[in-house]
Amino acid sequence: MAELHKGATLTPTKVELVASWMGSQRWYAAKGTSPVVHRLASWRLGDPAGEVGVEVLVVSDASGPAPVVYQVPLTYRGAPLEGAEHALVGTMEHSVLGRRWVYDAPHDPVYAGQLLELVQGRVRAESTAQSDAHDDTVVATPGAAWSRDVRVVGSRVLSGEQSNTSVILDCEDTSGAPVPVIVKVFRMLSTGENPDVVLQSALREAGCARVPAVVGSVAGQWPEPDASGEASAEGGRTAYGHFAFAQEFLPGVEDAWRVAAAAVRSGEDFSGPARALGEATAEVHATLAESLGTTPTDPQVVREILGGMRLRYAAAAAEVGALEELEDAVGAVLDAAEGASWPALQRIHGDYHLGQVLHTPDGGWVLLDFEGEPLRPLAERNQPDQWIRDIAGMLRSFDYAGGAVEHESGGSAREWVTSAQQAFLDGYAATAGEDPRDRAALLAAFELDKAMYEVVYEVRNRPSWVDIPLAAVQRLASGFHQDADAQHSPAHQEDTP
C-alpha cells in the first residue's frame, strides 16, 4: 500500500484545486457557476510501482439550490505526465514530497490499470485515513458471466461524453490475445444502484447477447451532504451508489444513427435492418421482464404518467406558439390513452434511440447505455416503466434521421422514415407476439410526449431544427384525431354490432 504522510500540508489544498477546475468540465452540471466544493469521502488505489498517488474523492458542490455529489478521481505525480497536459487539474506544493502534478485520473494509465484490477477483484480499495488498511465501504462485483483474466496495456478517454467519463482499455488476456474493455466512470453520484449496471448485468446473466459482456462494477458509500453541502454529522445518513462499470468494448463498429443516416443519404432501403432492430428490442424487453419482473399498471400510475405529458405539452406550447392551436387534438390523444388498456410496468432502456445501438458484423444489433434519461432523478430511472416508451423513442429517432438529412440536402425523406418505422414495428411484433400498433392511443401519446421534449430542446439549443419535432407533433396529433373521428363516423357505427 502507498505511504501516507500524516500531518503534511498541501498548497493549495485538494478541495481548493478541484474547486478551481471542476466548473469547466463537461460533466459539471451547474454550468456558468463557481463550484462550492466540500469533501465527503475518499479512497485510494495503490500503484504497483509505488510512484503515483491514486485517490478518488467524493465531493459535493453547494453552488446551486441543493448540493450535488460528484466523483473526482485524481492522480498525484512527482513530474508531469507526458501527453496529458489537457488533463492537468493543477499543481500543488506538498510539505514532504515537494511539487506534485495533479491529473484527472481517467487520463492516467496508472489509475486505468488499477481500476480494472479493482473491478476484477484482484486488488482492494485502500483507506485514506490509515496506512495498511483497506476501505471496506468500496466493493467490487466482477461480472457473473465474465471468465477472462485481462490486464491493461494501454488506455485512452473517449471524447464527447457529457455526464460521465468512459475509458477505453487496451487489454490482453493470459494468452496475449487482445480483449478491449470500456469502463464508465460515473461522475454525478446519487444514492441507489445505477440502472446501466443493473439492467445490463441482468441481461447478460440471463444469457442475452444483445448487450456487451459485463466485466464488473464498483460501488460504495459516502456521507450524504447536509443543506450546506458538508458531510452529515456523526450519525447522519449514508448514501450508496455505483462508481464505475466495465464492459467488453466493440471496436470498429458504428452506431445505428450513423448507419441509418448513411442509408437515408444514399436512398438505401433500411427495412431489413430496422426489422432486425425491432426484433432485438423485443428480445431485450422480454428478458428484462422475465429477469426483473413486472407490475400491473394501476389507474393512479396512468394518471401520473399522463399528467406529466400534459405538463410537458403546456411547457412546449408556452415556448412555441404554433402548438397552442393543437390543444384539442393533443388532449384527444391523451384522453384516449387514459381510457386504453395499459400493459404491465417493467424495466426498460429508458432513453432509447439510434445512438444507443451498435451494429456488429457478426452479432447484429447490440444495445448500450441503459441509464435512462440523464435529466431524470436516479430514483425515477430505477422505477419500472412502459415498454412502449422505448418503442416511441426509436420511432422518433428514425424520424430525426430522416429530418437531419432533409436539413442537409433538402428534399423529402418521409417515405424512408415511414418504411423504417413500420419495419421496426413489424420486427417487434413478430418477436414479442404483441404489435405496438394495436395500442394506437398509447403509442401516439408516448410519441407526442417525446416530440414535445424535442421541441423545447431545439428551441433552446438549435432553433433551426425545431421544424422536425414540430412537424411530428402536428402529424401525430392531427393524424390520431382524424382516425378517431373516422372510427366514430356514422359509417363506422353501422359496422358495429
Image: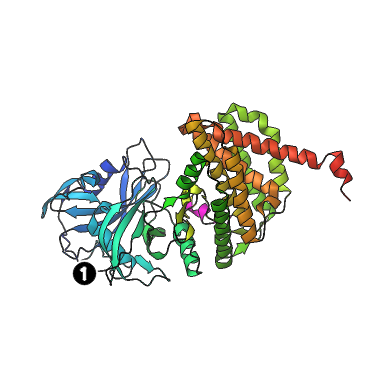
Who's the residue at 24% across and 46% down the image? Answer: 87
For this rendering, which residue is in front, 297 or 431? Answer: 431
Q: Is residue 139 above or below residue 89?
A: below
Q: Is residue 416 above or below residue 368?
A: above
For residue 486, what is the image quadrant?
A: top right
Who's the residue at 22% across and 46% down the image? Answer: 88
Extent of the magenta region: 378-385
Residue 181 % position (x, y): 34, 60
Who's the residue at 28% across and 53% down the image? Answer: 156
Residue 129 % position (x, y): 24, 62
Can you see residue 386?
no
Residue 51 % position (x, y): 15, 60
Q: How is colour applied across the structure in the image?
A: rainbow
For this rendering, which residue is in front, 265 or 76? Answer: 265
Q: Which residue is mark 1?
A: 132
Where, quadrant-wise, is the N terminus in this rendering? bottom left
For residue 326, what is the image quadrant?
A: top right
Residue 11 % position (x, y): 16, 46
For this rendering, which residue is in front, 284 or 460? Answer: 284
Q: Left or right? Give the position of 66 relative to 48.
A: right
Q: Amino acid at mark 1?
A: Asp
Total marks shown come to: 1
Badge 1 marks a residue whose secondary structure is: loop
Q: Is residue 311 above or below residue 347?
A: above
